Amino acid sequence: MCHNLHSDHRIRLQLAARRARRGRLSGLGQQCDWLIYNDRSPLRWNELWIALIYPIVWIMVVLLRGATDGWVPYPFLNPAQGYGIVALYALAIAVATVIFAAVIWTVSRLNPLRSPALAEIR
């Protein structure tokens, strides 16, 4: 009986490790696809704001939950420390998001394999 429990635990650990590797490889494959293949036009600069939608909604949900039941996933977003401090952290998250998105937007324009015709579309 004890041997079966140990075996089951080992199998679960092996499956979890496989899922984690597959997740990392899938993400890496998607990034390589985006960087290497030239079937997409460059991203428009006037669409950079789209990258802020998720972080803004996420911060609003975290603040609402923190204000209603006191639980927040990160201490720096805890409304109990004051909304001014939380606003500074939210601003830092927004700035980091825009910087990261700008890098991605720039890389979308630097793809040497992209067809010149696609660059003219946008």
Image: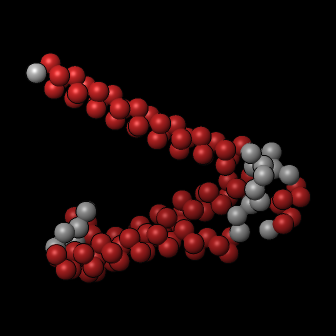
Q: Position of residue 96 (x, y in %)?
A: 47, 63
Query: What colouring method underlies this structural image?
Result: secondary structure
Q: Position of residue 37 (x, y in %)?
A: 74, 45
Q: Find residue 85 and report its image quarter.
A: bottom left
Query: Visible in this render: residue 88?
Result: no
Q: Tell me: 38 left or right of 89.
A: right
Q: Residue at x 67, y 53 (%)?
A: 107
Residue furthest to the top: 3
Residue 75 drawn at (x, y percent): 22, 64
**Residue 120 is at least partly visible in this image:** yes
Q: Is residue 99 above or below residue 112?
A: below
Residue 39 higher or lower than 78, as above or below = above
Determine the image quadrant of residue 50: bottom right
Classify residue 23 as left or right of residue 77. Answer: right
Which x, y percent locates residue 57?
Answer: 41, 75
**Which residue occupies 54% across, 68% down?**
51
Depth check: give the residue in front, 25 or 51: 25
Residue at 60 percent across and 45 percent down: it is 30
Q: Which residue extends farthest right?
A: 117
Where does the N terminus fall, quadrant-wise? top left
Return the residue nearer the eye: 66 or 88.
66
* Picture quadrant where residue 118 is located: bottom right
Q: Is residue 96 above or below residue 25?
A: below
Q: Which residue ends up furthest to the front in the rendered image? A: 1
